[in-house]
């Protein structure tokens, strides 16, 4: 049986970096589930119906180079509030999680909805200011910091307050706050937790 790691948390908390590093360390598959919602959002930004878009995703959608933009993050957050969109993306995520070599998935509802039986659940978070600063640096400080902070807060509010699969830690998730911890500290903690569980 594969080992499944569920990593949730708000935008720019460091969960993608952690997930990628853990997958590389243990030879697990890695799925950035935010990209699924971004790919749906990209189609919707071009006028397509969100539910049709979610059913029609193919590899070509993930080759777009604008998926990680701030704008697509906003579209993704809006389509992610539609229950039929979430439902359409569920089987793909669960199949990925069951990979025999092991899997790390990161997103907003992995520990609560997609993989409630994950072997390890982590909730990675940081203050809105720290996360906005990281996003601002990532985009080369190409827009005012206050605008990035406002977008981070908007997205948090939408992701946490939606009715279907809102962002929240699973009751059995370990909470990791990266406001003051370095990614290496967090990675070391997570590697130790996985190694202990696999040897148990
Ligand atoms: O992780 P990200 O910033 O790429 O995610 C983009 C949006 O997609 C996020 O604002 C909410 C949504 N999302 C979600 O609802 N559930 C997930 N498992 C992953 C992302």
Image (cartoon, rainbow, N blue to C red):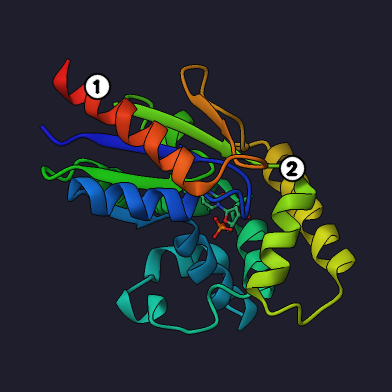
Label 2, label 1: how far apart the Cα atoms are? 29 Å
- In this rendered view, identify the residue nearer to me: 13 or 78: 13
113 up-or-down from 200: above or below: below
Identify the residue at horizontal 61%, vertical 37% (top origin): 167
Q: Position of residue 56 (x, y in %)?
A: 38, 70
Which numbered disc, 2 or 1, marks the residue that appears first in the sequence? Answer: 2
- Dot 2, how many residues are within 10 Å of its Cα: few (below 14), some (14-19), or many (20+)? some
Question: Is residue 29 in view from this perspective?
Answer: no
42 up-or-down from 115: above or below: below
Q: Position of residue 3 (x, y in %)?
A: 20, 34
Q: Is residue 80 left or right of residue 109?
A: right
For the C terminus, give its image quadrant. top left
Q: Is residue 173 left or right of residue 91?
A: right
Q: Secondary structure at mark 2?
A: loop
- In this rendered view, identify the residue nearer to me: 88 or 114: 114
The numbered mark at residue 196 is 1
Q: Position of residue 57 (x, y in %)?
A: 38, 70
Identify the residue at horizontal 54%, vertical 43% (top origin): 108
Q: Position of residue 62 (x, y in %)?
A: 39, 75
Q: State the image quarter where residue 126 is shown.
A: top right
Q: Which residue is mark 2?
A: 127
Identify the residue at horizontal 32%, vertical 24% (top origin): 117
Question: Is residue 46 in view from this perspective?
Answer: yes
Q: State the image quarter where residue 127 is shown.
A: top right
Q: Is mark 1 within 8 Å of ligand 1?
A: no
- Dot 1, how many residues are within 10 Å of its Cα: few (below 14), some (14-19), or many (20+)? few
Q: Is residue 176 left or right of residue 146?
A: left
For the N terminus, give its image quadrant. top left
Q: Secondary structure at mark 1?
A: helix
- In this rendered view, identify the residue nearer to me: 87 or 96: 96
The numbered mark at residue 25 is none
């Amino acid at each position: 049986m594969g080992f499944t790691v569920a990593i949730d948390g708000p935008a720019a908390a460091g969960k993608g970096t952690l997930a990628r590093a853990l997958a590389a360390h243990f030879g697990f598959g890695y799925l950035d589930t935010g990209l699924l919602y971004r790919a749906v959002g990209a189609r919707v930004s071009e006028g397509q119906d969100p539910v049709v878009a979610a059913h029609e995703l193919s590899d070509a959608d993930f080759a777009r180079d604008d998926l990680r933009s701030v704008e697509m993050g906003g579209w993704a957050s809006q389509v992610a509030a539609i229950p039929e969109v979430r439902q359409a993306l569920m089987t793909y995520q669960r199949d990925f999680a069951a990979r025999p070599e092991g899997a790390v998935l990161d997103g907003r509802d992995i520990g609560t909805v997609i993989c409630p039986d994950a072997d390890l659940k982590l909730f990675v978070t940081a203050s809105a200011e720290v996360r906005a600063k990281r996003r601002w640096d990532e985009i080369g400080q190409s827009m005012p910091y206050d605008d990035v902070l406002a977008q981070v807060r908007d997205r948090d509010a939408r992701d946490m307050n939606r009715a279907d699969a809102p962002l929240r830690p699973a009751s059995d998730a370990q909470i990791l706050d990266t406001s003051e911890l370095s990614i290496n500290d967090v990675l070391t903690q997570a590697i130790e937790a996985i190694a202990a569980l696999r040897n148990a």
